[in-house]
Image (tube, helix red, strand yellow):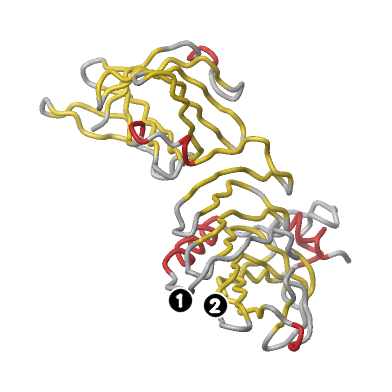
């Protein structure tokens, strides 16, 4: 029985675990002192010996203590049963074949054997009773000074998602994507994150005097983007927020400057160009955006619309 095939279909690592891990990674106090290079060619799936301490080489493959560069510490996140109660008669999908087999979710923390300092962390999962593992979820490579060198993730053992490369101070200098192990062609650099565009911009879409609907673009200094809509209702001659996204979709943004007050704003979602707009600064707190390109996943009737956005 091939562990990877079982896990590819059956393993569901909870999204809450993903973000829980992210919080734990970012809050952990690391005591390190110099920068290190990033090695992404590591063993993201495989088999480790059943031992109290697992020693590993530079590619995170099992080795003997005298040849080891790193050692592994596991941080338990939780257990969950193999999903899918339906009787499908499909060996790889049907729970009946793996009934009550727990999936064990961990954060795998890899430390340098010379100084015990954290080098790499990733969400990882195992099936109870097996010594195989697979990376699935958040991952990060840490510099010797404690700052994150590379932040990204895995999907069933393959590099996947939005990656952020940091400088010696941990500031994001580059963003790029992996999709199931393949690096995308688009690379965003820190110069693309234009300071005057930072902020939570909001434009009115509809207002009938009692109900307002707005579009919000939250452009962050690290190149990330949140996009969502807000709804307001008027009560006692005052507008109050009625509904808003609690977990809005996220993407990346890039600004291409043309003149001091005009340029092109690009939004990326899942590694692909989602929207391109002409931007004009009216003042420090107001801009005009007119879309010139919309990916087919968006309603094309909005193409070419001009909206006036304001900062709070």
Name which residue lies at 55% across and 44% down.
175
x, y percentage for residue 117? 54, 77
- Going by the image, does 155 lie left or right of 304? right
C-alpha separation, residue under disc 1 versus residue under disc 2: 7 Å
Quarter containing the C terminus:
top left
Q: Quadrant of residue 35?
A: bottom right
Which residue is labeled 2 in the image? 117
Q: Is residue 245 above or below residue 101?
A: above
Q: Are marks 1 and 2 in contact (CB under 8 Å)?
A: yes
Which residue is labeled 1 in the image? 31
Name which residue lies at 72% across and 47% down.
180
x, y percentage for residue 215? 37, 26
- Going by the image, does 21 lie left or right of 307? right
Disc ID at residue 96 = none
Q: Which of the pair 231/115 is nearer the observer? A: 115
Name which residue lies at 46% across and 21% down.
264
């Amino acid at each position: 029985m091939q562990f990877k095939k079982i896990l590819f279909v059956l393993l569901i690592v909870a999204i809450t675990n993903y973000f829980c891990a992210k919080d734990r990674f970012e809050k952990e106090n690391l005591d390190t002192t110099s920068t290190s290079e990033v090695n992404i060619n590591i063993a993201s799936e495989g088999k480790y010996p059943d031992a109290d301490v697992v020693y590993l080489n530079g590619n995170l493959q099992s080795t003997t203590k005298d040849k080891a560069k790193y050692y592994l510490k596991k941080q338990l996140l939780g257990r969950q049963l193999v999903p899918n109660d339906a009787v499908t008669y499909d060996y790889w999908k049907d729970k009946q074949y793996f009934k009550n087999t727990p999936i064990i979710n961990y954060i795998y923390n890899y430390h340098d054997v010379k100084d015990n300092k954290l080098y790499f962390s990733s969400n990882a999962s195992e099936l109870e009773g097996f010594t195989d593992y697979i990376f699935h979820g958040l991952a990060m490579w840490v510099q010797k000074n404690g700052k994150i060198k590379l932040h990204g993730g895995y999907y069933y053992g393959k590099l996947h998602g939005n990656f952020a490369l940091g400088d010696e101070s941990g500031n994001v200098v580059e963003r790029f994507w992996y999709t199931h192990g393949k690096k995308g062609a688009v690379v965003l650099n820190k110069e693309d994150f234009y300071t005057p565009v930072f902020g939570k911009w909001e434009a009115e879409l509809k207002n009938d005097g009692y109900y307002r609907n707005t579009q919000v673009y939250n452009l962050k200094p690290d190149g990330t983007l949140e996009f969502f809509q807000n709804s307001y209702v008027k009560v006692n001659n005052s507008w109050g927020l009625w509904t808003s996204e609690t977990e809005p979709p996220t993407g990346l943004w890039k600004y291409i400057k043309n003149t001091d007050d005009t340029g092109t704003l690009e939004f990326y979602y899942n590694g692909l160009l989602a929207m391109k707009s002409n931007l004009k600064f009216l003042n420090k707190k107001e801009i005009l955006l007119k879309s010139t390109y919309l990916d087919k996943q968006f309603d094309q009737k909005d193409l070419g619309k001009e909206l006036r956005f304001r900062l709070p």
